Amino acid sequence: MVANHRRRCASGQNGDVDLTPLRENHQYRLLFGSGLVTGLGSAATFVAMPYQVADITGSYVAVGVLGLLEIVPLVVFGLWGGVLADRIDRRTMVLVTETAFMFGVVVLLFNAWRGDAAQVWPIYVVAVLISAIDSLQRPSLESIVPRVVPASQLSAAGALNSFRGSSARVVGPAIGGFLIALGGVEAAYLFDLATFVVSATLIFRLDPVPNLRAEHAHPIEELRQAFRYVRTRRDIMGTYVCDTLAMLFAFPFALFPFIADEYDATWSLGVMYTALSVGELIASATSRWSKRVVHHGRFVVFAGMVWGVAIGAAGMVGSIWWVLGCLVFAGAADMVSGLFRMLIWNLTIPDRLRGRMAGIELLSYSIGPQLGQVRATVTARMTSVRGSLVIGGLLCTGAVGSMRGALPELWNYDVRDTLGSVDSPTG
């Protein structure tokens, strides 16, 4: 009985994540393995960098500057990365950027090896570099998946990608903390460097993913083409708007230190970040049901509203444990929203535009949380920490829910119109 149960789990039965892309698609296995390995290493480095800045300066502001330095590269290089993804071989783009990542980690490592002579400015420079490289790489990386995974398996691949990312966000920081305690930040940087070597090796084994277009316009005109396409696709516009509204009104990260103080539970600060990833992990691991959904846009709306309800509820409960439970629920909703947004993009966006559209998506994905940090802290100052959570949750739920009427194209989106009778989900 135990053996039969394990076989059912491995095949994705009983509600578990569908492993079909991993079993049947060698190209996807390479992508998945690369992403998992590099995700663990990057998470360790993102723990080590603020730790080292705090150790050198003892300043909260100096640590906060790390986050601010990421914003401009995200905007500028995200759009340019989208243009490049539609112009050159996407595998080559990922390989080049992986090499650039390795260079950045080498700089961090040499700076750390200086011991007491280590300085902050190299860490800031690498933070900007990493943000720029990630923005250049992500459109190409995301645009590879629909080229190597058949349409009928994109739902399963999306869930697996979310599972991989959530796992890295849960396990990676723990690895980073352990390595820092064992051998200092140098150990964390060495681990990240090793993961990039493994990741680049896996990507090198991937088949080329060449550009399919014969002609190219000026880069600015190519960006205009992408924005014009968004205006003609109100269902895709709706996915951007729903995510931006949810993050603008109910992004809670800036409030976590104050929530920990509110409940006199300093220990919970790191756990709150992990709770969201745990929710994503649970939702990813039980995502097989998503293949039966045909109205993807409705689940984007529903999930955004549930995110708002969960964040608002976190402001009304009376225990830090209930807060953590709300965050787990919110993380699960965020994963569901991301899964169905990804499906709409990958199933309907033409390959010739996919890189640039990924660049635009990166903007919506990044700007919302940054503005949400401001909204959350300003509202908390005007009311209270709990008030900010409740007000943000209510605004999020109402604003995302209004998309049913404001953008009916998203609400009425039916995947069967895209896939046809052969590949359409059943049920």
Image (cartoon, rainbow, N blue to C red):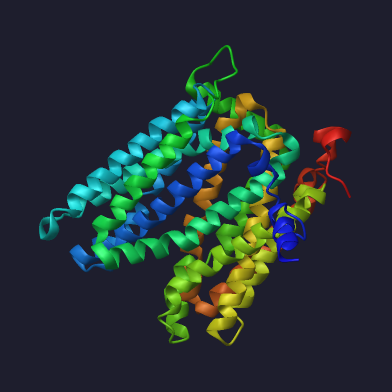
Q: Residue 15 placed where, x, y %?
A: 75, 59
Q: Is residue 394 visible?
A: no
Q: Is residue 402 left or right of residue 250?
A: right
Q: State the residue at coordinates (78%, 49%).
A: 291
Residue 145, above or below 284 = above
Extreme top residue here?
214
The mark total stands at: 0
Name the quadrant containing residue 346: top right
Q: Is residue 379 visible?
A: yes
Q: Position of residue 351 (x, y in %)?
A: 64, 27
Q: Residue at x 61, y 84 (%)?
A: 317
Asked whether, in this view, residue 1 is left or right of residue 26, the answer is right
Relative depth, front residue between 316 and 323: 323
Q: In the displayed structure, does residue 307 sit left or right of residue 387?
A: right
Q: Nearer the viewer, residue 357 or 277?
A: 277
Q: Nearer the viewer, residue 91 or 242?
A: 91
The N terminus lies in quadrant: bottom right
Residue 58 % position (x, y): 21, 69
Report the residue at 29% width, 42% height from top: 104
The residue at 52%/30% (across/down) is 206
Q: Give how far across and how far down residue 26 sits, in percent.
A: 60, 35
Which of the pair 302/343 is nearer the observer? 343
Extreme residue in the left direction: 117
- Residue 15 against residue 36 in the figure, above or below: below
